[in-house]
Image: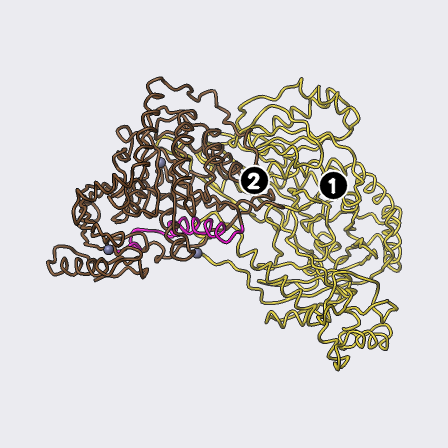
Chain colours: A brown, B yellow
Amino acid sequence: MAVKPFGLVFFPAFDWALTPTHPEREERLLYTRDQIVEEGLLDIPGIREYKPRLATLRDADRVHIGVPDIASHITDAHLVSAGGAITAAEAVIKGEVARAFALVRPPGHHAMRVVHGTRGFCTINIEAVMAEHLRRHHGVRRVAIVDTDVHHGDGTQDIFYHDPDTLFISFHQDGRTLYPGSGFTDEAGSPRAYGTTLNLPLPPGTTDEGLHYVLDNLIIPVLEDFRPDIVINSAGQDNHYSDPLANMAITAQGYASLAAKLKADIAVLEGGYSIEDALPYVNTGIILAMAGLDYSRVVEPDIAAAPHGLTDGARAYLRELVARQSALWRDREQLGTVAAAKAGDFWTRRRGIYYDDSGISEQQVEKLRICPRCHGYLTVASEAEGHHCGYQSAFAAVVPREPCPACRQGAKDAVLAAKRQGKYQHYIIQDKENDLLERV
Amino acid sequence: MLLGIDVGGTYTDAVVVAGGKVLSQAKAPTTHDDLLHGILGALDQVLAGVDPAAIGRVALSTTIVTNAVVEGRLEKVGLLLLPGPGMDISSLVPERPWLLSGYIDHRGRETSPPKEAEVAAACRDLADREVFAVAGKFAIRNPLHEQAVADWLRRHTGPAHITLGSAVAGSLNFWRRANSAYYNAAVWRHFGRFARAAQAAVAGRGVTAPVHILKADGGTMPLAAAGSRPVEAVFTGPAASVLGIMALAAPQGEAVSLDIGGTTTDIALWRDGAPLFAERGAKIGDYPTAVRSFWLRSIGVGGDSCVRREGGRLTVGPERRGPAMALGGPVPTVSDAMIVAGAADFGDKGKAIEAMRITAAGGESVQDAARAVLAVAADAIYTAIGKMIDERAAEPVYRVEDAVRDRRPQPAVLVGVGGASAGLAPLVAERLGVRCSVPAGAMVANAVGAAAARPTIEVTLRADTAQGYYTVAELGLRATLPSRRFSLADARDLASSHLAERAAAAGIPVVDVESVYDEEFNLVRGFSTTGKIIACRLQIKPGVFTTQEGA
Ligand SMILES: [Zn+2]
Ligand SMILES: [Zn+2]
Ligand SMILES: [Zn+2]
């Protein structure tokens, strides 16, 4: 074949569930398996299936600060899922395939930098683990992540909030109406990475037309402008009209044509819980579209049930949203400078983070040094309390990639100072320059 | 006593075996324009001095189906597909299909009905066809649409034969089932003619035993039952060889087997004493099918492979330019090297030495040249085995338990059969660092395999307790479940009774039934369990008669 094949890492984790009746249960990708095997998708010459490899704890530690450590929160399933994403990415990077789709579970986009437990069905952030693996081992620098799950990808946003080399774009059902309740337009990145986080909250009921309006007029132009080395799609499928956890109106055709336009190098499955009425068709559509094959016949049997037509109000809202976020993107440097000036030497953020699956509430204070010479070091003070885990706390510092000497020293000093005060249980340095996670 | 016949590319071999021993063997040239002629030639020779009434079974491994496919002697098929939504396979099947409406979803539910008027229109368009293949997506979970289309075909035209996709295989993969159904219909008439003639000719020799045909999965089936599923008799040569190895050497645990013939070496990997199957099915021409077959790799190295130097580098095969120089051939071959190295003893040794003199690099002795040739040939086989092991280790898995466990094949023994195995198999085994076995009778392994192969049959049962029904695809059956409280154990019991039923209909004894795969999922709707989806496949294990069983 003249054209390069498309890579698929399919890992339905048929023996893994969060709990027996949880949406993340063994059955979730059963009907997707049925459909893609029945279609013969795994046999056609343009598609090459890969076995997922296992991610290492080091791959996870490069992204996460687990309290007390990441190993105590994850199962083998998480390492296979993250490893599946890495397998897909390596197939692309090595040039074996043109693009790849890691159709894997468990998902990851709600997992943040600090991990006390599981939230939004996610424990480790599989796209972030993949992206940082590519940066560390395969010479990738500029990464764009487009999150097309119905829920705001708050974990991915958190991990890359201070990283100007990672563009994170998420569209999702408006956080006032859906978990996790974030992803508003004013969440745009910390001052030195301003604008490389772009949120697009969409009104409930948004159809293919509305979604593609935002895609064509904002997401694609911004991606072109950013010039990423690699484009990653966090390919959640819960915007589908039949999804039980959300209220959107996207069809399999809407998702497939999105995949065709986005031309992501790597897609990674996130959510999607309409396991019978949506996932078989959406996944088939995405696979065909990414493989450059005809997807026009992929139509849900109950397509008549799909709502259609946008209200005038929704249309006006989307126009305004695209205009506002286009302006933010255009003016991002200037807006970032203003924000940096306002912050002074340190940018600070205090947040409460809830782990719905683990029943844990975390209070977190982040302090980022606004540094003229590097991305700045970050400290995170985290205290968590839950029914099962009791009280857990940690103080961590993150040394950025290519740090200036002052930030390298500053991160270390901050942790040592905190340790002398002794308020926290664990003291950790995540050193992105040397790829180390150290306990102090 | 069991009689086996293997139709090969050059010779047709026949053997009579009993208790794992070859009692009589014979050879006749294969007659390509009329296979039966050569078969009967070999049969008459092997029966000389044998009481035909004492033969318990005759089994044929023939190229009748393979040749029909390879030579394009295929009947025009009316191919009707019910693809529903999804990938468009119109251009991926061997015949331009008629696409019909009607869809069955992944749970076997009808989401839109098929239309008789479309079938009537198809019949007008396909008026020149007498054989038909009908395949619907997810028909294995509900065959009613395929069956309705078949009924309408019978009403609107006078088909000589209809193959249903759901009946050729019980596994998921509409595309493969469609291809299988097509080839089955396309060779149906040709095979039927051969089967009737073979049956009559064998009976004419006073053999009253049933006549079986070997399938690609290494099992046999009675000729009568094979008439409706001839596509399963494709590619039986390699299957016969593998079965022969099982009969002659019975490799235990993990093993690798080689059938080193004139121009090719067929490689198989073994686990738990059984050869590995191709995960999804055999490929016929460019088309993947659902025909179950062993997982074999064929490479262009054999006794007749020509040997030459290209830019100082020694190369072996893949072409054959004639027999060994020792047998009057024009160019040096692997066999000549074997003769010089003392691993074989036939033909004119002087000519073999002459062949190695041509092959030798400057100053190299003929013995060293022969050793170098064998090393190159063995290396090609060794490399191919390594690739197969890598591929098997990289086979995708869908469970965490399987993903974290390393299931890389680690063969502990190498078994070689075929004409050139004595010279090459030990060298390959040495490279692999495993024990080598070249069993007696290795030269007629294929015919022995056919003779000793047991009949096999399988059923796939899938139960959906939330909907209260189950299907057995191979039987075209969709029936109500006896109880909503239905377990995997119940499913196995029910499947084994259907297996017995299917075996009885085909005239096959039920022995050594094994579960090939099973799965069980809880159906959860709105946070409560509403039922289970259970699937299991049982088969009579492919294998060989070790004693007089079945004979
Ligand atoms: Zn790598
Ligand atoms: Zn989601
Ligand atoms: Zn700095």
Q: Chain letter of disc 1?
A: B
- Mark 1 close to ligand 1, CB under 8 Å: no
Which one is in front, A88 or B154? Answer: A88
Write down the quadrant of residue B431 in the picture: bottom right
What is the tally of numbered marks visible in this picture? 2
Q: Residues within 10 Å of mark 2 (few under 14, many from 20)?
A: many
Q: Which residues are magenta?
A: A68-96
Q: Tell if the residue under mark 1 belongs to the same chain as the one under mark 2.
A: no
The x and y percentages for residue B18 are 75, 60
Question: Any magenta on residue A83?
Answer: yes
- Mark 2 close to ligand 2, CB under 8 Å: no
Q: Chain letter of disc 2?
A: A
Q: Is residue A279 left or right of residue B146?
A: left
- Residue type beneath disc 1: Pro
SS at circle 1: helix
Q: Are marks 1 and 2 in contact (CB under 8 Å)?
A: no
Which one is in front, B487 or A207? Answer: A207
Q: To which residue does mark 1 refer?
A: B230
- Residue type beneath disc 2: Leu
The quarter of the rendering in which ligand 2 is drawn is top left
- A415 above or below B157? below
